[in-house]
Amino acid sequence: MVSFDYIVKDVMGLHARPVGVVVKAVAAFKTTKVTIAHNGVLADGKRLFAILGLQVKQGETITVSADGENEQEVLDSILSVFKAENL
């Protein structure tokens, strides 16, 4: 299992459009479990509403974890979406 911490920079926090892009990118990795944690609450990284339910605001830290095949590739993909979306 590999993970990274990320501080959300977007004024709107984690919102639907960039989270939708993340979910779409992660969906291609069927055998890898992706989890996003915020304040002790875990969300399935392949479920849009689960991630939005974390209610992450600007300046808050999330931990993104991947477990399974292609772990690092999945995390690299997520991080590139975060950077491209200026999240």
Image (cartoon, helix red, strand yellow):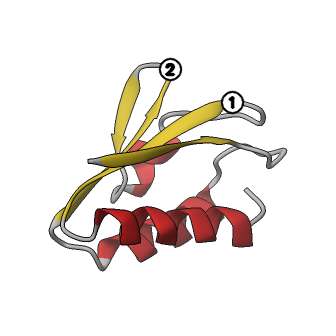
Q: Measuring 63% from the left and 32% from the top, which residue is drawn there?
A: 61
Of callouts 1 and 2, the N-terminal one: 2
Q: Which residue is mark 1?
A: 60
Secondary element at tag 2:
loop
Q: Which mark is residue 17?
A: none
Q: Measuring 37% from the left and 53% from the top, which residue is drawn there?
A: 45
Q: Measuring 43% from the left and 75% from the top, which residue is drawn there?
A: 25
> Which amino acid lies under the numbered mark 2 shown in the image of this protein?
Asn
Quarter of the C terminus within the rendering:
bottom right
46 versus 2 height, above or below: below
42 versus 45 height, above or below: above
11 left or right, relative to 16: right
Q: Measuring 54% from the left and 72% from the top, which residue is drawn there?
A: 21
Label 2 Cα crowd, 10 Å radius (few <14 / some 14-19 / many 20+): few
Picture coordinates of residue 80, whole percent (x, y): 61, 70
Q: Which residue is mark 2?
A: 39
37 left or right, relative to 83: left
Residue 26 placement: quadrant: bottom left
Label 1 Cα crowd, 10 Å radius (few <14 / some 14-19 / many 20+): some
